[in-house]
Amino acid sequence: MAKIYAVANVPPEVSAYGMAKYSRSSAPLSDTLREISQEKASNFLNTFYFSYGHASIADLAHIVLAIEDISMLAAMTLVDEPLWDGQERSTRYQNFLTAPYYRPRGASAEFDQFCSQLFAFYGELLQASLEALQIRYPRPEHMTSGTYQRTMQARALDIARYALPLATLTSVGQVTSARVLEQQISRLLTSEYPEVRDMAQEMKIAVTERAAFSLTESLGQPLAPTLIKYADANPYLADLTARLKTLANEIFRSPPTGPEISPVDLFMAADPITDGLAMAFYGTTALPFGWIRERLRDLSTSVRSELIDHLFQGRGAHDGWPKFFRTGTLIFDILMDIGAFRDFNRHRRVNKVVQPIDIHQEFAEPDMLQEFAVPINYHSWMEKYYRSLISGTMAPLDKPYLLPLAHRRRALFVMDPAQAAYIIELRSRSAGHFSYRQIAVKMHHSLQQVLPDLARHIRVTPFEEFDPFER
Ligand SMILES: Cc1cc2nc3c(=O)[nH]c(=O)nc-3n(C[C@H](O)[C@H](O)[C@H](O)COP(=O)(O)OP(=O)(O)OC[C@H]3O[C@@H](n4cnc5c(N)ncnc54)[C@H](O)[C@@H]3O)c2cc1C
């Protein structure tokens, strides 16, 4: 019988270390956690997370953060994080009439005048809308007066929010992994808005230096003193944004004029190069996507190729691919041994279609056996084993349990170019297993055939580059 239990009241970095230990130890997590201190966790994370670059360990440390009294503008930037979980104050269920607002440093008295105008108008809109709604929708007989009032108030607040300034203060609660938090803080520290940068700096201090709020006294210490300590502004992202603005001014000289475009336009994905470039420029201009994409299509292949190079210029050792290349669909049909499949199966920004385990699919043979002249007749041993397994009289669903990890399995791995680049860069490294390293290198070769302008920016480690001592 499997042993399953929930774990509570463990500091995030300690539980991350505890779970990471499954990788190296057969001990139950409950035993491991009893032995681990924050100091031991910090030492481990310094080595594995920072020195060996095992990024997914930081996925295991989850951190709850309260981010209160920030402007709605800052909150919008804060939550723009794909793996973010959280909640913000609702404009439907809270009346913001007397809410404080954010004042940028050195803002003039005019700033306050504009804010007061909007808040005053908000109050007027709320009152007038409430009255109009009550006339239009009288209280149904089955509804209590309290429920009716709250419902109408919520509908009126939905209208009044049109007048709320983005300076209005709001509060956000979030739960993220330390990996996401590190990326989030780095992105926010790169913002052009001082408030957003200040907020990011405070977030960093809150998890690395300040004791956390805790209902259990022993936990009142900083939650992620190790994993977040290097979170810093990202010069690559900052330069890229500046470069895109300059390039956009050169390329898009006559922006469209005329009738207002429709609020929703649907575009089918074109090729990942044109779409990726169009998204990059879209994010730094106020131009419609379709128009940008058409202008880019008019450019020669060599000019577009140069533009692609601009997007990668200055990419640091720890910077991922720009998010603009999370577009386009690449379908890899991969036949691999189950050992390698287990490793590839862990990639999440991938849509997998896996074929059932087929006992007739045969087994893989590690090249290393020949290369190191290992004195074992692997092939004939495996063949004999497979023959007896296939002809055995066991129940069909018992047989898959008796297949070795050498057994082959076929699966589709569907992803965008950015994820393909991520997998190729990570899985081709010398430290990895030779089976998935070969697959990663082959994925790169296939990409070179179809998207050479993107493939050349993938930092693939050639298969021959092998250091047995690298970790
Ligand atoms: C050398 C090496 C040794 C390893 N050893 C072990 C081991 O001993 N035990 C073990 O269990 N595992 C091990 N692993 C596997 C590892 O822990 C990861 O599970 C695996 O590498 C995939 O994780 P990833 O987060 O890096 O990539 P992906 O899952 O491919 O994620 C790629 C990126 O996308 C982000 N992302 C993921 N999902 C989403 C989403 N829905 N939306 C937006 N972004 C998303 C991720 O945060 C990440 O930044 C090892 C891996 C390597 C490379």
Image (spheres, rainbow, N blue to C red):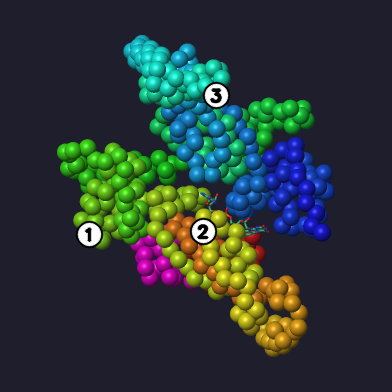
Above or below: residue 167 compared with residue 38: above
Residue 283 vertical position relative to residue 375 in the rendered view, above or below: above
**Is disc 2 placed on a helix, strand or loop?**
loop
Span highlighted in magenta in the image = 441-458
User: Which amino acid, by three-letter code, is at mark 2?
Assistant: Val
Q: Where is residue 360? Give x, y as percent.
A: 62, 82
Q: Are marks 2 and 1 in contact (CB under 8 Å)?
A: no
Q: Amino acid at mark 1?
A: Ser
- Residue 312: x percent and y percent? 39, 52
Residue in view at x 59 percent, y 40 percent: 176
Q: CA gap, disc 1 to disc 3?
A: 68 Å
Task: Decide which of 98, 33 is in the foreground and name it.
Answer: 98
Point 60% across, 42% down: residue:
177
**Residue 299 sits in quarter:** bottom left
| Ligand 1, image quadrant it occupies | bottom right
Return the disc, 1 or 3, that comes first in the chain's sequence.
3
Q: Is residue 458 left or right of residue 273?
A: right
Residue indicated by mark 1: 300
From the viewer's perspective, is the residue at label 2 or at label 1 nearer? 2
Name the quarter where the C terminus is drawn: bottom right
What amino acid type should be assigned to the residue bearing mark 3? Answer: His
Location of mark 2 (residue): 350
Q: Which mark, by number, is residue 116?
A: none
Q: Is residue 352 visible?
A: yes
**Mark in front: 2 vs 3:** 3
**Is residue 313 in sight in this rendering?**
no
